[in-house]
């Protein structure tokens, strides 16, 4: 295989060359398995995307199953700071492939060091998403990264910049961009079938997810292999171990680890509003609170309202224009006016990730931009963070999307970032 001096041959090129060479050595013993060359409708190894997983929690288990269902994917490693999760992940992968080849890792740097892995599923807690994504990109791997992309604005900006700098394919796990009922609603808005867009409504999670700050009493810290507490905390401020912190019901509503109800569902619903408004390169320019809701305006005059509830299920959105409106959610609830805009077929319900996963894998092969790339994910989560800051400070805010800073408000600007615990840095 000829190549220019200094050019690194990637794994797929190497395997293609190996297979071609093997084909010419007809007298040599056959050492390449039918699985490696492709059998039972499965692509040969040279055409498969080899994947690993960082963070095997409840969300990861479902998404990883979808990846493994794709014939052109081979999952080879699972990493988690909890022994129980590592073992569950390895078992799931081994059961899928009928072997014991999946490697279980405690340390994410070990799985990132594998040269044979092309892409990662990053499904850690929210406060690890940005850092894990940047580390994955620096290791030369593409990634499907769960939402919310960040805990503060500066983190997701670092992710978008890092993906661009290292040329990585990135898909944010905002899968509703690829789910039929939401695609239908966004299409009505983007094609002008609702007339001139006026107001976009994004549902936020129930109020019990409103974030807070607390310190729990110290408990005896588990052995590192059982639960690596220091690594679980990662960039978050140090605190003594207490088992409740690691419960999703706790950390997902805690300021050190999450943005609460607004980022939990807003990372999906605000994201859908952004896409419907063709605003993947910007965010609203002003924010204010009316009762429990946060209102915002885009530079083009369209209004965004973060509220609850919308529709009959979770993650509802409503788009209103001068000539019509559409409302949709996860339950399959779909209302549209005028009735002539109703789809001719049922669009289903729920939020399956299949199409979103497939879009990511296709883009890994073509090196094209995914439907939920890092810049768009950054801009939508920025709107969520700005809404949170507006609520926390209890006053209106103005935002400059070009400079990505609040106008004339030093306190709000300090809340765009957070201190990282050493030795972590973006």
Image (cartoon, rainbow, N blue to C red):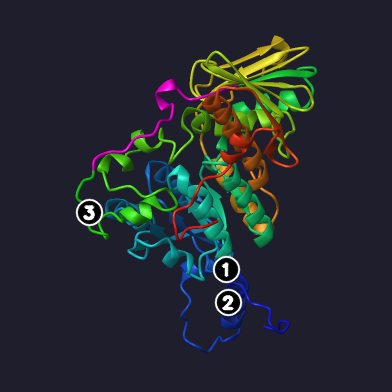
Badge 2 element: helix
- Asked if residue 116 is positioned above or below residue 192 in the image, the reply reads below
Distance between the Cα atoms at labels 2 and 3? 48 Å
For the view shown, which residue lies furthest in the top direction?
Answer: 338
- Asked if residue 284 is positioned above or below residue 125 in the image, the reply reads above
- Where on the picture, by quarter, is residue 12? bottom right
Distance between the Cα atoms at labels 1 and 3? 42 Å
As rendered, which of 111 and 364 lies closer to the eye? 111
Badge 3 element: loop
Q: Nearer the viewer, mark 1 or mark 3?
A: 3
Q: Are marks 1 and 2 in contact (CB under 8 Å)?
A: yes
Residue 209 covered by magenta stretch? yes
The stretch of residues the image draws in magenta is 202-217
**Residue at 54 percent of width and 50 percent of height:** 144
Disc 1 or 2, which lies upstream in sequence? 2
**Residue at 54 percent of width and 24 percent of height:** 391
Please provide percent x and percent y for residue 237. Answer: 41, 48
What mark, if any, has residue 46 been given in the picture?
Answer: 1
Neighbours of disc 1 within 10 Å: few (<14), some (14-19), many (20+): many
Q: Are marks 1 and 3 in contact (CB under 8 Å)?
A: no
Please name the residue that numbered disc 2 is placed on. Answer: 19
Please name the residue that numbered disc 3 is placed on. Answer: 222
Residue 193 covered by magenta stretch? no
Q: Nearer the viewer, mark 1 or mark 2?
A: 1
Left or right relative to 148: residue 93: left
- Asked if residue 165 is positioned above or below residue 393 in the image, the reply reads below
Badge 1 element: helix
């Amino acid at each position: 295989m000829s190549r220019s001096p200094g050019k690194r041959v990637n794994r797929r090129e190497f395997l293609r060359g190996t297979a071609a060479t093997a084909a010419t050595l007809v007298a040599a013993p056959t050492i390449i398995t039918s699985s490696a060359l492709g059998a039972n409708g499965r692509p040969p190894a040279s055409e498969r995307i080899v994947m690993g997983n960082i963070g095997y929690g409840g969300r990861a288990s479902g998404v990883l199953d979808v990846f493994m269902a794709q014939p052109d994917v081979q999952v080879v490693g699972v990493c988690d700071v909890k022994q129980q999760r590592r073992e569950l992940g390895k078992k799931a992968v081994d059961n899928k492939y009928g072997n014991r080849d999946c490697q279980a890792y405690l340390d994410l740097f070990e799985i990132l060091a594998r040269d044979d892995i092309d892409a990662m599923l990053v499904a850690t807690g929210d406060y690890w998403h940005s850092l894990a994504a940047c580390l994955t990109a620096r290791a030369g791997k593409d990634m499907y990264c769960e939402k919310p992309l960040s805990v503060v604005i500066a983190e997701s900006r670092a992710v978008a910049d890092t993906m661009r700098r290292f040329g990585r394919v990135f898909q944010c796990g905002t899968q509703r961009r690829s789910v039929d009922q939401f695609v239908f609603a966004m299409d009505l808005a983007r094609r002008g079938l609702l007339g001139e867009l006026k107001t976009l409504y994004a549902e936020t999670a129930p109020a019990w997810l409103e974030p807070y700050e607390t310190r729990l009493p110290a408990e005896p810290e588990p052995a590192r292999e059982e639960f690596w507490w220091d690594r679980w905390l990662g960039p978050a401020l140090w605190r003594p171990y207490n088992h409740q912190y690691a419960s999703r019901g706790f950390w997902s509503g805690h300021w050190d680890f999450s943005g609460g109800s607004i980022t939990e569902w807003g990372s999906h619903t605000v994201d859908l509003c952004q896409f419907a408004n063709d605003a993947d390169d910007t965010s609203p320019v002003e924010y204010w609170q009316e009762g429990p809701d946060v209102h915002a305006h885009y530079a083009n005059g369209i209004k965004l309202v973060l509220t609850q509830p919308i529709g009959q299920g979770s993650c509802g959105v409503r788009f209103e224009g001068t000539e019509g409106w559409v409302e949709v959610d996860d339950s399959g609830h779909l209302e549209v006016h005028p009735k002539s805009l109703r789809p001719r077929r049922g669009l289903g319900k729920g939020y399956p990730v299949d199409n979103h996963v497939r879009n990511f894998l296709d883009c890994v092969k073509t090196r094209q931009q995914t439907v939920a790339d890092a810049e768009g994910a950054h801009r939508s989560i920025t709107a969520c963070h700005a809404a949170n800051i507006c609520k926390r400070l209890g006053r209106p805010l103005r935002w400059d999307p070009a400079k990505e800073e609040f106008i004339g408000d030093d306190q709000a600007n300090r809340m765009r970032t957070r201190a990282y615990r050493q030795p972590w840095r973006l």
